[in-house]
Image (tube, grey):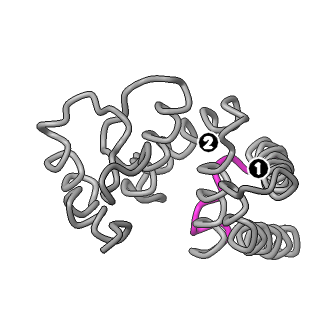
Amino acid sequence: MAHDISALTAELTDMAAADHRSAAHANSEDPAEQLAWRRLTARHGDRLGEIMDAYGWPTAELVGEAAARAAWLIAQHADRQLDVQRRALHLMQQAVSAGSAGPRELAFLRDRTLVNEGRKQIYGTQIAGMKDGAPVPWPCEEPERMDALRAEVGIEPFDEYVAKFTLS
């Protein structure tokens, strides 16, 4: 089993590295690059589904911090595989309840899944686009409570968060 876990840890971190290398292609002007990104994230989403079947949510206790974060990243980017995203969200919620996963990452995954379902997000983590050089979030359920809800899960206030993306 220990060998299986070390192989799983390596596989998840390799998948995250590949994701990082090609993430710029997600919004590329080049259709071939967009297609390569979609294929990569679909392959990763399929594999995450198999991993969840075998192990449940890959927590830091099981696979280490980097690989657990990699699993979360893969779930975040499984945008065309809502079944995988919803399942990851469900398993991650259980892990957060058990104290073996972080509420901050869960909040990002919850917002991402809601947006992909065409619903309003909760924490304002998903950006719809830019307006006058400033990021605009997808619609939120309770925009007036967004920063309070963000604080509860350890996410900085929206204005600080988007300052990282704002074009000066």
How far apart are the alpha carbons under marks 2 and 1? 9 Å
Residue extending furthest front? 132
Which image quadrant: the N terminus?
Answer: bottom right
For image coordinates 37% across by 27% down, the residue present is 120
Q: Which mark, by number, is residue 48?
A: 1
**Which amino acid type is shown beneath numbered disc 2?**
Ala
For image coordinates 81% across by 45% down, the residue present is 42
In front of the other: 65 or 33: 33
For image coordinates 84% across by 49% down, the residue present is 35
The residue pinned by badge 2 equals 88
Sequence-wise, the earlier of marks 2 and 1 is 1
10 Å neighbourhood of mark 1: few (<14), some, or many (≥20)?
Answer: many
Q: Position of residue 64 (x, y in %)?
A: 62, 75
Q: Position of residue 52 (x, y in %)?
A: 73, 45
Q: Which mark, by number, is residue 139?
A: none
In front of the other: 74 or 10: 74
Is residue 22 on the magenta stretch? no
Which image quadrant: the C terminus?
Answer: bottom left
Q: Are marks 2 and 1 in contact (CB under 8 Å)?
A: yes
Q: Position of residue 159 (x, y in %)?
A: 20, 60
Judged from the image, the secondary structure of the residue bearing numbered disc 2 is helix
The part of the chain drawn in magenta is 54-63
